[in-house]
Image: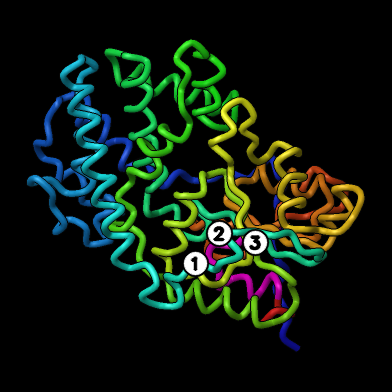
Amino acid sequence: MTSIPLTKTISIDDYKEESPDKNLIDIINHIHSVKSFDHLLDLANDWKLRDHETDSIKYKGLTTYERLIDLVLLPGNAESRSEYISIIKNQLERNNQQLKSILNTTPGTTINDNIIISTPTPCSKVFLFDIDNCLYSKHLNIHMLMQILIRKYFQYILKLDSYDIAKKLNEKYYKQYGLAIKGLINEHPDLKIDPVEYNSFVDDALPLHEIIKPDLELRETLLKIKQSGKFEKMWLYTNAYKSHALRCIVLLGIADIFDGLTFCDYEMVNDMICKPDPISYWNMTEQVGLRGDTIEERLKECVFIDDSLRNLEMGMHLNMKKCILIDHDVTEPYLIDAREANKKINVIGRFKDLESVLPELF
């Protein structure tokens, strides 16, 4: 008789996520220290971004990543701030033109009307999906490119001479507030920062169309889940603003699959709520239409997939049926012992691994 191998289980304190950004960070630090792109390609031999054949896409002689890293080299004087605004505006225009060119060209690029105008309808069984570093791989290094844009916005709005100071503030505010923009607003009320403008200069300015491509394997897995009939709704749940969320799912070719979207509302300047704040989860249940008087009742039949262990821990604490961590470095699915008694978080490396975690759907 052949024995079936047991799934590995580890303590939550033993989970260590490998950063996909190390090579990119090394390159940025090098460029920042020598103020030059000399030997960039030699340094980038192991740079995973090169796997996506974006080196041929040039604008004003620079590749996508060189353009973004070029922002690091801009000093903080008034002339450079004006140049920075021009660079961002040009990128936003290119992004908008590209998005318009592919919208509604295939089923996957047509956004479900329920996402745009969401009306809560009563339900109990919902599959919740994070977006960034979840629906697309963290190895695309979009997170690191986003950090560059966040830090340049810090440098611009706070009139900082040093990119390094902006970097440290970004890290501090993220740890303290969960979102860098919340730190900016709370710590600098005199600046009257507009979060929607911030989003334009950061997430919306990312050249995602040069990085994210339609993912047919992901689409096939999501359609299988939808067609299984086990869930009443498939719902997007992200800390990003809606414009970024919608652009991601259109570029991935999955915009027609989901039944709704809960996002961090950047228009609520003084009341921006995001995961893992329990209020965010409650707001999401209201938007979805989940039945129950308490959040525990509402979430008891829900499945949640995210790349953040903190967000999933809160999901476990709030009584979600199953929480799944996606970590694109993982080669074999395993389990993490949650801090909640007798509860475990599933860990997978790609969406296709859901077949081993939720075999009843496939």
Residue at figure coordinates x 50%, y 28% from the top left: 181
Give the residues in magenta.
Answer: 346-358
N-terminal-most mark, 2 or 1: 1
Residue at figure coordinates x 46%, y 22% from the top left: 193
Q: Amino acid at mark 3?
A: Trp
The image position of residue 194, as x and y in percent, is 46, 27
Quadrant of the rendered image containing residue 239: top right
Q: Could you say which is closer to the camera, residue 196 or residue 208?
A: 196
Q: Amino acid at mark 2?
A: Ile
**Residue 184 seen in the current view:** yes
Q: Which residue is mark 1?
A: 111
SS of the residue under disc 3: strand
Does 217 appear above or below 152?
below
The image position of residue 54, as x and y in percent, is 21, 58
Q: Residues within 10 Å of mark 2 (few under 14, many from 20)?
A: few
Residue at figure coordinates x 7%, y 46% from the top left: 61
Q: Between marks 2 and 1, how big is the CA–CA gap?
A: 8 Å
For discs 3 and 2, the disc positioned in front in the rendered view: 2
Q: Residues within 10 Å of mark 3 (few under 14, many from 20)?
A: many
SS of the residue under disc 2: helix
Q: Amino acid at mark 1?
A: Ile
Quadrant of the rendered image containing residue 225: bottom right
For discs 1 and 3, the disc positioned in front in the rendered view: 1
277 is within the stretch colored magenta: no
**Residue 347 seen in the current view:** no
Quadrant of the rendered image containing residue 268: top right
Does 339 appear above or below 270?
below
Per the rendering, the mark at residue 235 is 3
User: Could you tell me if the residues under marks 2 and 1 are in contact, i.e. CB atoms within 8 Å?
Assistant: yes
Q: Which residue is mark 2?
A: 116
N-terminal-most mark, 3 or 2: 2
Give the residue at the far right of this rendering. 293
